[in-house]
Image (tube, rainbow, N blue to C red):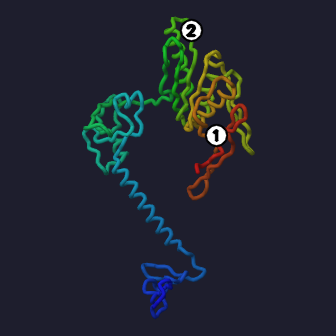
Amino acid sequence: PKPSNVATPEPTTKEGGSKILPKDALNDNSRLIDGEPVTMDADEDLILEDDYERAEMVRQRKDDERAIAKANERGVRVVNAFEGYAFDYGMRPGDKLLAVDGWKIDAGTSVEDVRNRLRGTPGSSVDITFERPGVDGDVTITLPRTVVQISDVKLVTLVGKAEDGIGYIQLSGFTADAGREVRNGIFALQQATEEASGGERSLQGLILDLRGNPGGLLTSAVDVSSLLVPKGSEIVSAKGRGFPGVTYKSRVDPILDPKTKLAVLINDSTASAAEIVSGAVQDLDVGVIVGSGRTFGKGLVQNVEELPFDTALKFTVAKYYTPSGRCIQSTKYYTP
């Protein structure tokens, strides 16, 4: 009898291969082209250039088709509803648009088509029908068309008892008007505190909320910092190899009373210009930083150089530093 622990040789064909695997499949130098085995020379590339480009085109097309199918399934949805406009009329992020002025939105409708339907002459109105997850039925609102000015300061208010004089400013970005908006917000809080206390006290504390602020213009970061730090104080500097050092200082007196307590709220999405402001506040000891972790760490000065064949190279020439010399740029470039 044949021992059970001895492997039985696999039946072979006259050509030397097995019935399961053809002879060429056992050859390391063979591959299939159009379903037929072809033996390659030792100096032949594993994948021909044309084959690789064709495979890449097929892969990219399939990826595009999957992305389009997924987008069509989700439909056209609201990404952000601006406060003071669409938000105030009832729209919320995540709402799925169904119709614009009775024009139905289907799976083949593009975002550009919807955008063109929404736009119109300022002063006219548009009816928007949408559905919201968790809410039964469709909702239709009438939205007046107008020129929308997106404000960096989303909220200015007194928290707690008004007479206590604790102000709150939520700053979501650093566009060209950020400094002016923060200045007006501080003035409004100071006036509201004086009115609530009968003129007995001024603003006692200010909370500047920079959580989720992705940054913006460097000049706007300097403008906002100048409202809080002493005149002549260094706010931020840029240094790099072969790069002429640049230092930005406050040239005006702060509008915030030195006796007013300042707290800056940050999180891991506080980046760029927002880190310049929070770094200046912390290093110059004009306020405290409150957050559960470190800020994002985006502090690079970069240039773009054009290259042949419609390409360009983006490279770093310097980094931003806080008044005490701390580099704003994070050294952790990826998450394991």
Check disc 2: other Cα within 10 Å, few if <14, some if 14-19, many if 20+: some
At x 43%, y 83%, the residue is 20
Pick the residue in front: 136 or 143: 136
Q: Is residue 253 left or right of residue 150?
A: right
- Residue under pointer 1: 299
| Kind of residue sitting beneath label 2 | Arg
The span from disc 1 to disc 2 (Cα, nearest Å) is 39 Å
Q: Picture coordinates of residue 142 (x, y %)?
A: 29, 31
Q: Picture coordinates of residue 95 (x, y %)?
A: 35, 39
Q: Is residue 322 left or right of residue 22?
A: right
For residue 38, say whether it is visible: no
At x 58%, y 37%, the residue is 271
Instruction: Kindly indicate the quadrant of the structure image that contains residue 144.
Output: top left
Seen as rendered, the residue at the extreme front is 1
| Kind of residue sitting beneath label 1 | Gly
Work out whether 124 lies above or below 183: below
- Residue under pointer 2: 201
